[in-house]
Image: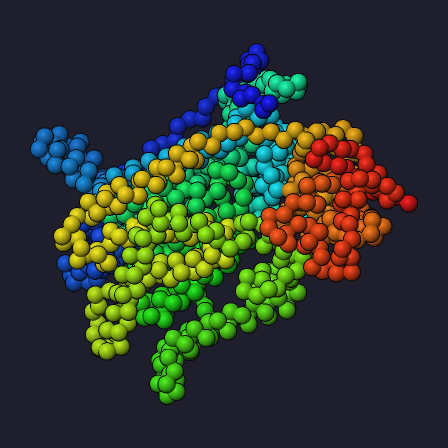
Amino acid sequence: MGRPRRGLAKKAPPPSAGGNGGGGGASPPPSPPPPLPQEGSRRHRGLSGAGEPDRALAHTEKGPAGAARGLQQPLGRQLPGGASSAMKRGGAGRRAAKNGSPRPEEQRERLARGFRECQDWLRAYLNETGVFIARADSKIWLTLIMAAVAGILHWWHITALFENDRHFSHLSTLEREMAFRTEMGLYYSYFKTITEAPSFLNGVWTIMNDKLTEYPLVINTLKRFNVYPEVVVGFWYRLYTETMNVMGIPTKKCWTVNRGEDLSPVESCEGLGDPASFYVAMIFLLNGLMVSIFFLYGTYLSGNRFGGLLTVACYFFNHGESTRVMWTPPLRESFSYPFLVVQMLLLTYILRTQNVNRRSLIALSVSNVFFMLPWQFAQFVLLTQVASVFGIYILGLIDSSKLQKILYAHMGILELGPKYILKMCSRRGISSWAIEGFFCFLGTITLKFLMCLIFGTADDAHISNLLKSKFTGYRDFHTSMYTCAVEFDFMEKQTPVKYMKTLLLPVVLVVFSVIVMKTFQHVMCRKELPERQEDNFNHGEIVYHALQLMFFTVLAILFMRLKLFLTPHMCIMASLICSKQLFGWLFSKIQPGTLVLAILAMMAFEGVANLQREWSIVGEFSNLPQEELLLWIKQKTKPDAVFAGPMPTMASVKLSALRPIVNHPHYEDAGLRARTKTVYSMYSRKPAKEVKRELLKLGVNYYILEDSWCLRRSKPGCSMPEIWDIEDTANVGKVPLCTLMSMDSRPYFRTVFNNNIYKVLEVTRE
């Protein structure tokens, strides 16, 4: 009989007294915005009636003197007379008030003029600080409110799904830590170190000089495992709890929970004062904000709020194919991907704008940093983005100057210059596309090879082997460890079917086909009439999204896990069904809103059913065998006892028992892969004496054996003994060592703990 739902079993302890605290004084109000010239306000309102950005007006406009004034000028340059001039006008007004009271009509006119100036300044400020939606829709506040609502809905959705799945608010501290399986527990352990350290700096020093994760090595886990988010969130947690303690505000409530089934009661705490709850809440807030950015992204790209609405609706209707943050919050993608969305929005703005200002490029660089810091895989995604931008450069949709601003350097190809390349092509009859593409590909491969050769790095070697295994019959131990996992297998055949049922795939195919057709017409027009300056379709940002879609599709087909890039990008592409550049001929017959509402009505049949299936997932986390194991380790072993075993279990041992481990789930490091292979020799057919000798070299005291790993296989050839057979051909046909150890571990090991899942073997010293 399963454990009962624990919502009605809470008993509150007597409330503890809190200390008194004082509040700080209020800061002075900001100064009123300086006035802007009236032509500046008209310039920022240069938008077409259908919500599509007016490209010509958005970039330059002739002033009274005939000089071109860019929309992206700094605010200080747009002020007549600068700040000193504004101060003089203010002073004159105060002197006038002393001489005599103004007439009511003048006072009302002054207030109205001041209100208009504030409104103009706000529009200019929003544009300068990067809220690009101001150029796509004149009703900024309505757009921002809709974006905020979308973000709040997603935050509530993923929070509710996570709570329904695990009943997280009613779990004890140990159960919450066990709920973070595999690498999630490893990442969370560093957040725990930050929060429990005597000081924040002491916690940072500890994770930068870690002695537990890869015993006996001392490693910088901040750099190795990209745990910068844990440092930031840990700092926020310490700041929040210390501030609330000073103010005397309680941050959590603790309860005694009766678990039933003859189990001892546990204490469960709710509120942001609980470290695990705070950690998860920050992740969900970030991913809620991400959907707000999605709405702004879709609105800006399509030029219509209905495009943003369609993007968000597609994301919700295909939620299970778009993200897994509600099931696995601590994974690196949960921190990293939201910044990719911001980065792609900024890149879209830069590609669409003729005169790119420095602020936009700085913002792009910052978003690149935030995207790359948490996740080691980000570099490969940015490589596909560089290839996509280079593709629109080859097609002539952006010039070399803009490409240089985005990339700053591109393998020397820009130094040759377009004229030289075209001259060489005309002499030899070779397509310039082929020449430039060849140089790009060759330069990338050469640079990667030289970097690996110079620095002696082998951490990414498994990537090339993994790609080789996808196209050939190549297999080795490490490649099989990846390909036997479902998330690294090919895309499931059901995934395109799911896209079809929600109509996401048909809509994207229509948009993609129109982009291809218009791009082909544009290229042919430039080739036949090169002297023509005007062009009906010169939108590099739209073609970029089509090329990026192709790259994301290839990645998702090869690695099912990478659907998290493909599905959201398809949702962004769906917004282009509202684009006048693509479907202007259609909007002369039907309103974009009518078209979008009709599409949403058809999508909702399957989309709402998908949401209902997610809402129907109700469970409660419980892992009693692992709880028994961890409690035994904490009570019966020394604090410096060294453990080895399956990677997921090792993360829990380090997190909850604080014991040194020799291997862990972060499999991307070459040295760690070699260690794990040695540890997993327990599941090979090697002799016990040989396996023990290798474990002693690593300094292992205890080995945690899971019998299920001897038999479990996700598909043929994927059980641990079968994986070992690929390289250990000398012992093929023998009984696996793990099977022998489950029956009798003597004489080389001694069983010291045993339950129905786990067996702890002590590595005896001779």
Q: Please state if 51 lies on the left or on the right of 421 as rendered.
A: left
Image spot of residue 682 (x, y percent): 76, 48
Instruction: Depth check: give the residue in front, 52 or 495.
Output: 495
Report the label total: 0
Image spot of residue 99 (x, y percent): 14, 32
Please, is residue 567 above or below residue 325 in the view? below
Please identify the quarter of the rendering in which residue 152 is found: top left
Image spot of residue 603 (x, y percent): 30, 43
Instruction: Depth check: give the residue in front, 52 or 665.
Output: 665
Q: Please state if 241 lies on the left or on the right of 285 as rendered.
A: right
Which residue is outermost to the right? 766
Which residue is outermost to the front? 733
Image spot of residue 387 (x, y percent): 43, 65
Q: Please state if 465 lies on the left or on the right of 83 as rendered.
A: right
Point out the image quarter for the C terminus.
Answer: top right
Could you tell me if residue 705 is visible in this image? yes
Point out the image quarter for the N terminus.
Answer: top right
Please, is residue 687 above or below residue 278 in the view? below
